[in-house]
Image: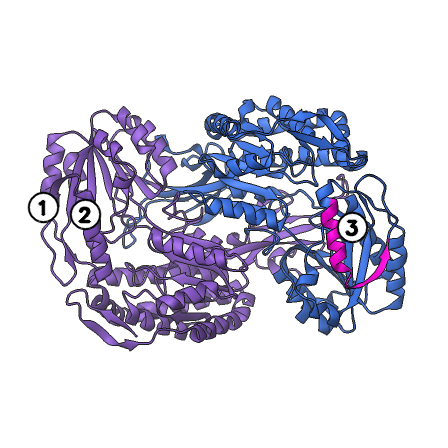
Chain colours: A purple, B blue
Amino acid sequence: MIYGHDPRTGQTVGAALPETDSAGVDVAVSAAATAGAAWRAASAEERARGLEAVSDALTAHVDELWQLADQETALGEVRLRGEVARAAGQFRLFAQVIRDGAYLEAIIDHADGSLTPPRPDVRRMKHALRGVVAVFSASNFPFAFSVAGGDTASALAAGCPVVVKAHPGHPNTSERVAKIVREALPDPDLLGLVQGMQAGVDLVKHPEVVAVGFTGSVAGGKAIQKLIDEREVPIPFYGELGSVNPVVVLPSAPAKDVATGFAGSVTLGVGQFCTNPGLMFVPDDDELRQALVEAVEGTSGGSMLAERIRDGYLGGIGRLGELRLLAEGKPGEGNWAVTPKVFTTDLDTFAEKLPHIAEECFGPASIVVTYREISDLPAVLERLDGSLTATVHSTDPSEAGDVAEVLGKKAGRLIWNGWPTGVAVCWAMHHGGPWPSSTSTFTSVGATAIDRWLAPTAYQDWPEALLPDELKDANPLSVPRRVDGRLQV
Amino acid sequence: MIYGHDPRTGQTVGAALPETDSAGVDVAVSAAATAGAAWRAASAEERARGLEAVSDALTAHVDELWQLADQETALGEVRLRGEVARAAGQFRLFAQVIRDGAYLEAIIDHADGSLTPPRPDVRRMKHALRGVVAVFSASNFPFAFSVAGGDTASALAAGCPVVVKAHPGHPNTSERVAKIVREALPDPDLLGLVQGMQAGVDLVKHPEVVAVGFTGSVAGGKAIQKLIDEREVPIPFYGELGSVNPVVVLPSAPAKDVATGFAGSVTLGVGQFCTNPGLMFVPDDDELRQALVEAVEGTSGGSMLAERIRDGYLGGIGRLGELRLLAEGKPGEGNWAVTPKVFTTDLDTFAEKLPHIAEECFGPASIVVTYREISDLPAVLERLDGSLTATVHSTDPSEAGDVAEVLGKKAGRLIWNGWPTGVAVCWAMHHGGPWPSSTSTFTSVGATAIDRWLAPTAYQDWPEALLPDELKDANPLSVPRRVDGRLQV
């Protein structure tokens, strides 16, 4: 049986929930596959309304949802209300995306007999993958990266039914969210929920599953890839794994602002963000060092989401103990409480300890590396693993060129004078990056996250009566298309 | 040492070529990586001119090239001249694609302080993968899917340097084409060529290789995936593997046209096409059967590309021997000559022998399966593996709905009253399909083949001076973009 736990007390929350056995996983996937046929065939407008109904339902239940999630995560009212709003907003964004229709990448090349060889009429657009999308929830976002998170919203938008493997950190919240989403959808079977580790294994191996979305650790991601390799038919794996999110502070950056922003970003949500700034390069400067010490000492820890995550953090800061402790925050309260800790070293020592020293430590910890000359940085940055983000602090773009160029190779999102925590949900967002931060070149946040659940079909000399409406000459749905080489909006 | 062989005689062609050892692979990849930095940074216009120079160089050398390739492949003047033109045309298409700029998927979301939380300025576009693309040549297309084939053209267009592993079926042609392409490019090191099986292994495992393009067998594709799994950093694998390309002839289709077209498509290029129609469902009709026998008996075989490929074909038709031989063509001439063979059975027997009976048999062979009622077909078609193409012959779209729907799940390209051999190079083409016909949802032919070699970057509050031109507010390069949710062409 599975229990939720209150991180503040370690006590169980709610009733015992059964683990989903293999037969149960099969029931959920088969039901989703059956429901998926009509959903895939539905018009974009119908699917958009379904997504909006989910969005409305999440918003309507926010009072209940934040309280339930708070019992299982201790993330607090403000954060959790915000996260429900974020999840609801993601469903609305994807409703816009599918009404817009550009995501289908419709292309028409009319026949051309003047070419050698003569060209037939060829038309192409993307369709939802034909089968069920498996989604693995994240520990640290009970709403926005879980049952009703971005993977689920984008897959449903594409036209795919979804079966979610709940995260053991918030099983009751997962059940409640699933119920709300199922009731809002035109067919409740479009969303399935399974609980338990073995259910996750069965899910990945189910023949009707056609893609996997995952947010979690590098080790977890590798385990899922291994399961996929064992399948008879391999399927795409969209994993968002570990990320250290380097920040480079250049000499022109104002010390106070950097120190305050850094301390806030490192400790936000008890440091439990994949975009947590785990590594910051700063000029070797006493004023900045003093500002950092004061800012970090002004922070407080808190209870982490689960015992296993707390233990991972303690192990991580143990490893970082080979560096000097620069400052620590106040101890947090609660059963799995931890203390924010910032370590420091110089650039040469850091470089000697690569790569192990730059491994992600999930939680409110970071390393401040001091450098003498900007020109010393690129060679060391070059040796970092891939991250979701990289940040530059500077008031003078002319000093940043070389550093920005190296960081561009290392991260999927480049940030100027900001902090990596907080990922805007919008058309232009990219939340992904070089290995190990993600397993593909796709994003898991923002409008283009829908691209993961699509595959193209080309139609050659295909009769008008059998063509999808989006590819008929008259363009009855007014989707953006490229016709005979020219974009038409 | 590696030798080319003349399929007509089995004799060696040209001088012995050394296998590339590990050090040689490293030299080629490192040189490509170094040359790649400037190529990636070059403007789209500069790269487009480079691609056009390659196109011109291929065209200028067509007389020499077809003769050299004919010695190693016996594919004949008409086909090989056409294939050089096709390869040259692919470079021109990709020059258009990168001048157009839509492939970058540029998106700008301006900052919006009215939102909760406030949204920063976020801009996104795609960039070339940062490193070297490895390309494995195909046996059956010495130009269009080899050293100067679609993988190479699309990767160079994206901004990636390329190292090609030559196919042992045409090593001299590969060397000559590589020399011509290298001389046409602004930096010859943008294209490397390696020879030999072990060189292919070293190439896939090289740390500076960031993606692999492959055209070949399912077994070959699985072997490369295994090498990728052994890498420290996994990389994307774009393989085009086996495909049986089902054709469904409905009762309204004219028997004579079907028979002639089928016999031509099955035997074109001695059946050595990944889009060869290896399986055709026809009404149980004496007139059609007779027309098929006559058409197939009118064909001739020829020499296959290599001894190993000939042996594979003989093994394949051995397996098909459990069915009844419907007709065979005239024996071909040449050292590795084979005879076209078409087998037949009824739908029930075929269904009993699934899945093994529908495995691809590379060469001029096919299975004709007779059915009684259209309504008997969907359940059997449903059990087929994925293919690059599926074809319907009919003069009445209203009889085709159910069959078309099932075929839509099974193939990446749907063809009406045509034949799958011949893949138009255009904006709308999709050459890919469900496993095992390809390993991803991407295409290896047509404008969107460039998408394989790109990854997005998001820029958050990034200073104008450091933004790529494509993302500056003034849009100095006039690329199509989505700005604040609206497409602008």
Labels 3 and 1 share a subunit? no
Label 3: element kind: loop
Q: Residue A23 in the image: x percent, y percent?
A: 45, 75
Q: Earlier in the sequence, mark 1 or mark 2?
A: 1
Look at label 2 and name its amino acid. Ile
Q: Secondary structure at mark 1?
A: helix
Mark 2 vs 3: CB contact within 8 A: no
Q: Does residue B85 appear to the left or right of B487 in the view shown?
A: right
Q: Is residue A472 above or below residue B378?
A: above
**Dot 3 crowding, Cα within 10 Å, few <14, some 14–19, many 20+:** many
Q: Chain of mark 1?
A: A
Identify the residue under disc 2: A317
Amino acid found under the numbered disc labelled 1: Glu
Give the percent coordinates (x, y) of residue B359. Answer: 68, 58
Residue B364 — which label? 3
Residue B145's spot in the image, x, y percent? 65, 39
Where does residue A184 sit, x and y in percent of width and height? 40, 73
- Name the residue furthest bottom: A15
* Residue under numbered circle 1: A297
**Within-10-Å neighbours for mark 2: few <14, some 14–19, many 20+:** many
Q: Name the residue rendered at 85%, 61% in the picture.
A: B254
In the image, residue B28 lies in the stretch drawn in magenta: no
Could you tell whether B344 is left or right of B106 in the image?
right
Q: Which residue is painted at 56% across and 58% down in the image? A: A127
- B169 or A431, nearer to the observer: B169
A59 vs B15, nearest the viewer: B15
Q: Which residues are magenta?
A: B310-328
For badge 3, the amino acid type reads: Pro
Residue A156 in view here? no
